Amino acid sequence: MKQLSSDIPVPLPEDWARIHHELSILHNHKSDPNIPKPPVPLILAGAAFSTAGAIRDRWWNLVDWANQYGFAEEMAKMIPSAPEYDVAERIAGISENSTQHWWEGLGDDEE
C-alpha cells in the first residue's frame, strides 16, 4: 500500500480545501464507521489565529490520516506541484516566537 511522505509542503488554501472535499467524498463512499472523517483544513479565518507550525501540523494530520486509513494513493493524485513559497508562513497570523498578530497595529498611525 502506498504511503505519502510527511514532508509534503502545505498546499495553497484553495488546493487544500479541494483535497479535503474530495477526501470527504471518498470517505463517505467507503461507508466505514470505524474510519473518522478527514481532519478539517486550518485555512482562511483559522490561519489568522495560528502559527505556521500549527498550520503545518494540521496539514500533516491530513497526510497521516490518508496513510492510516488507506486514502494515500487517492490523495497523492490530488496534490498539486509545490508552491514556490512556504504557504504556512504566508497565511499564518501569529509568528512562531511571538504572540503578536499580523493585524495588531493596523490603523495605528504614528505621527
Image: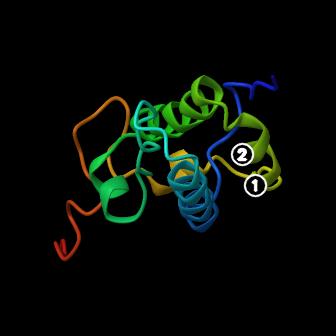
Q: Position of residue 12 (x, y in %)?
A: 62, 60
Residue 34: image quadrant is: top left
Residue 54: image quadrant is: top left
Q: Residue at x 79, y 38 (%)?
A: 73
Q: Nearer the viewer, residue 8 or 105?
A: 8
Question: Relative to 52, is 6 above or below?
Answer: above
Q: Nearer the viewer, residue 98 or 60?
A: 60
Residue type for callout 2? Met
Horizontal side of residue 15 vs 25, given as left or right: right
Q: Residue at x 75, y 46 (%)?
A: 74
Q: In the rendered view, how is the structure colored?
A: rainbow
Q: Position of residue 102 (x, y in %)?
A: 31, 57
Horizontal side of residue 19 vs 104, given as left or right: right
Residue type for callout 1? Met
The numbered mark at residue 75 is 2
Residue 10: image quadrant is: top right
10 Å neighbourhood of mark 2: few (<14), some, or many (≥20)?
some
Question: Relative to 38, is 66 above or below?
Answer: above
Horizontal side of residue 58 vs 69, given as left or right: left
Q: Residue at x 43, y 42 (%)?
A: 39
Question: Relative to 109, is 47 above or below?
Answer: above
Secondary element type, mark 2: helix
**Disc 1: which residue:** 78
Quarter the C terminus occupies: bottom left
Secondary element type, mark 1: helix
Question: Relative to 57, is 16 above or below?
Answer: below
Quote the CA–CA distance across marks 2 and 1.
Answer: 5 Å
Q: Nearer the viewer, residue 23 or 6?
A: 23
10 Å neighbourhood of mark 1: few (<14), some, or many (≥20)?
some
Q: Position of residue 97 (x, y in %)?
A: 34, 29
Q: Position of residue 57 (x, y in %)?
A: 46, 31
Q: Are marks 2 and 1 in contact (CB under 8 Å)?
A: yes
